[in-house]
Image (tube, rainbow, N blue to C red):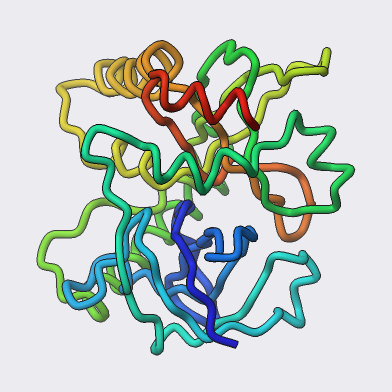
Amino acid sequence: MKKKILVLAKAEPLKSTKYDAVVCTAGITEDGEFIRIYPVHYRLFCDEKTNIKKYDWIEADCEKAKDDKRIESHKINPDLIKKVGHIETDGNWAIRNRILLPKLSKNIKELDESGASIGLIRPSEVLDFIYRKSDDAKADEAGREYNKAYQMIFDNECGLKKIPEIGKKLDRHFSYIFRCDGEDTKHNIICEDWELYQSFRSWEYDTEKELLEKIRQKFFDDFTTNHDLCFIMGTHFIYKTWIIIGLYYPPKNSTTQRYLDLS
């Protein structure tokens, strides 16, 4: 079945023995339903002919996944994806808000009870933003091998001469600590947002300390002060635990607040 999908979240790429480099991609259909699509090859996000971005409308032939029981998961034919539009902001996120903010869930508990594996929440309080590097030698080695694999994939599939380092997600983790409305629980949940990790890879500073300070300034200080930060949530395929797979951060203004009041 052909579906029109607005791309909302691109998680950090994963190495797949079956599909090579793939990106966990989540979106919302024109009917207002969350959807997870795979396999979406990494090359679709870096090839000049496709160059799929967040908030692009795409058309894809979808069928309910057989080996993934999560209700939103659909398998697609990646060779037949067609980009058919894009939602710009032009300083005003009204159109994006009209599509996404009605999908807000009150808290993690509500998401759990819904049986969904993709959702959108707006924390009542974002307490901290944490960076952690693994001390596990095996994870470090896996990261190096992961990076080599992606280097080869970039060379072969994308034809890029200079490739940013990939694979940091295996030994570096960013997490948000937050609370939701109606819950006493303090959540500490890893963030897999591609924009966050790509910023870590591509921003150039003299020291990692300086880089992390700049990352925090944007993804914590700015997003919690000047934006209405929301988390696009998805469950882990194996463990079924919630992960932040994308960030939605409309600027704080009357237009955004109107939709938040209605949701």
Q: Which residue is drawn at 71% across and 51% down?
A: 235
Horizontally, residue 128 falls left or right of residue 53, namely right
Judged left or right of residue 172, residue 151 is left
Viewer-closest of 24 and 140: 24
| Figure check: 106 above or below 12 | above
The one of 184 and 92 positioned closer to us in this rendering: 92
Find residue 168 and report its horizontal and vertical position in percent.
Answer: 41, 45
Residue 158 place in picture, x, y as percent: 22, 75
Marker count (numbered):
0
Instruction: Farthest residue to the left: give it.
Output: 161
Q: Is residue 211 above or below residue 51?
A: above
- Comparing 130 with 89, the one in front is 89
Quadrant in which the C terminus is drawn: top right
- Residue at 16% across / 25% down in the picture? 205
Residue in the picture at 47% in, 45% down = 169
* Viewer-side residue, 238 vs 207: 238
Picture quadrant of residue 146: bottom left
The residue located at (57%, 24%) in the rendering is 176
Which image quarter holds the N terminus?
bottom right
Left or right of residue 253, residue 261 in this image: right
